[in-house]
Image (cartoon, coloured by chain):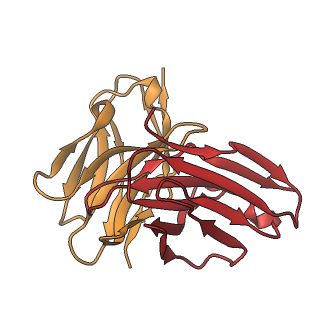
Amino acid sequence: DTAVSQTPKYLVTQMGNDKSIKCEQNLGHDTMYWYKQDSKKFLKIMFSYNNKELIINETVPNRFSPKSPDKAHLNLHINSLELGDSAVYFCASSPRGDTYGYTFGSGTRLTVV
Amino acid sequence: AQSVAQPEDQVNVAEGNPLTVKCTYSVSGNPYLFWYVQYPNRGLQFLLKYITGDNLVKGSYGFEAEFNKSQTSFHLKKPSALVSDSALYFCAVRDAWGDYGQNFVFGPGTRLSVLP
């Protein structure tokens, strides 16, 4: 299946831990993104990557760092997790061009206890 | 800065009735507008987009949206609602873009409940 896949789907961890969420797309898209959806379902962009270059970095704490080993992968590393990091994190991708929407992964629900 | 408003947190409609989910936007320049749907425990799925051309845009699952420049609105519509349409709907406007990709600003979402 052509898709954007994220792992894990659920992640429960303690405060202070370091964790990673993986994302892979087999759509041949040029750009990948990470979005955070909070408990009120509000979506906010965190990062986007194109050809291994960080293009957009919103005001996200530097405890969050995206890592892209290749064009098809964009992983999200989070250090020193805090309670407020609990949210659903969505990976997405889009092809080159200005008129395309995103293809989203199914999300990773992160719960920090 | 671009922004999107969805004035209704929740829309309830009976199955078979027409539905409307409202969206208004504020952009500088030409608006590129999108609708996405999120089913429970799923990622967002693209429904339709307006870039240019006809003000009435048709999309997936029988949905359509009407672009109204004077009212800066992009309401999502469907002539006959199905129970399976119950989901969270997001309106989005393209914010920044370039050869590298694009950034969207999403509205807060509207939960649609279609009652049997």
Q: Quadrant of residue B73?
A: bottom left
In this rendering, is residue A84 above or below A62? above
Q: Position of residue B68 (x, y in %)?
A: 19, 59
Q: Residue furthest top?
A: B116
Q: Which residue is at 64% across, 52% downward?
A: A22
In the image, the chain rendered in red is A
Q: Position of residue B105 (x, y in %)?
A: 43, 66
Can residue B16 be seen from the camera position used here? yes
Q: Which residue is at 35% across, 63% downward?
A: B93
Q: Position of residue A52 (x, y in %)?
A: 48, 68
Q: Residue furthest left?
A: B53
Q: Nearer the viewer, residue B44 or A50?
A: A50
Q: Quadrant of residue A94?
A: bottom left
Q: Quadrant of residue B16?
A: top left
In the image, the chain rendered in orange is B
Q: Which residue is at 89% across, 58% downward?
A: A14
Can residue B112 be seen from the camera position used here? no
Along the horizontal axis of the image, is A113 left or right of A30? Answer: right
Q: Nearer the viewer, residue A70 or A79?
A: A70
Along the horizontal axis of the image, is A24 left or right of A65? Answer: left
